[in-house]
Amino acid sequence: LAKTTQPISMDSYEGQEVNITCSHNNIATNDYITWYQQFPSQGPRFIIQGYKTKVTNEVASLFIPADRKSSTLSLPRVSLSDTAVYYCLVGDISSGSARQLTFGSGTQLTVLP
Amino acid sequence: NAGVTQTPKFQVLKTGQSMTLQCAQDMNHEYMSWYRQDPGMGLRLIHYSVGAGITDQGEVPNGYNVSRSTTEDFPLRLLSAAPSQTSVYFCASSLQGVGGYTFGSGTRLTVV
């Protein structure tokens, strides 16, 4: 299973772009990268998923270099409501085994006014 | 479209009692999972299922049973509650992993 490493915490200010990097040196060929957001007392919420290069949706962008050993979640113009824990997961999403998807400790993002 | 519904939201059990945490989804998702989250920690996988009649163990399965008789429902049974099972339990479902998992709002369980 690909192990992931993320910063424990990050601070930012409202209106800034925030980039959270996740390292996954032993990512396998069939593995996808998925990011979740979790607010206190709520279940995680899916943000974005990708395999290579760049993926963008209405909430965030995911940048994956050619070697796929890391990925960067980019949140444009954050607001106070983006304060949450962000998890990076790496695994073979088509294998059917949820064991492929392991939640680490995540990154606590705090957005300051 | 309700998504993933978990009941109850809160529960207090005495040591040794048994109970079932309910999870239902209305999105016709094949994959369903149960996680527990302890304070300040990430989620740990308890059991998961890739379809009706198919279940498998996750990282921390001891003390828990599951069954999947229908696509919609995936109940989690605590056989004999212990204080170490005090946690927040999340159920999640996914359409074959694509697009990530949709999580329920959780059940906060306290075992005294």
Image (cartoon, coloured by chain):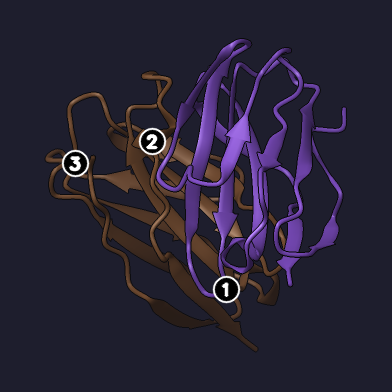
Chain colours: A brown, B purple
In this rendering, the answer to whether A21 lies above or below A47 is below
Q: Say if mark 2 contacts mark 3, CB within 8 Å.
A: no
- Is A108 or A12 nearer to us in this picture? A108
Asked if residue B14 lies left or right of residue A69, the reply is: right
Report the Cα–Cα distance between label 1 and label 2: 21 Å
x and y, in percent, of residue B67 in the image: 65, 23
Q: Which of marks 1 and 3 is in front?
A: 1
The reply to whether dot 1 and dot 3 touch (C-beta < 8 Å) is no
Residue B38 place in picture, x, y as percent: 56, 67
Q: Please tell me which residue lies in front, B24 or A72.
A: B24
Q: Disc 2 is attached to a residue of which chain? A: A
The kind of residue on which mark 1 rests is Pro
Callout 3: residue from which chain?
A
Q: In which quarter of the image is residue A65?
A: top left
Provide the secondary structure element on which disc 1 rests. loop
Label 2, on which residue?
A99
Which residue is the site of mark 1? B39
Same chain for mark 1 and mark 3? The answer is no
Are discs 1 and 2 both within one chain? no
On the image, the x and y values in percent for residue A91 come to: 33, 35
Query: On screen, A35 above or below A19?
Result: above
Within-10-Å neighbours for mark 2: few <14, some 14–19, many 20+: many
Q: Mark 3 points at which residue?
A: A68
Q: How far apart are marks 2 and 3 (CA)?
A: 21 Å
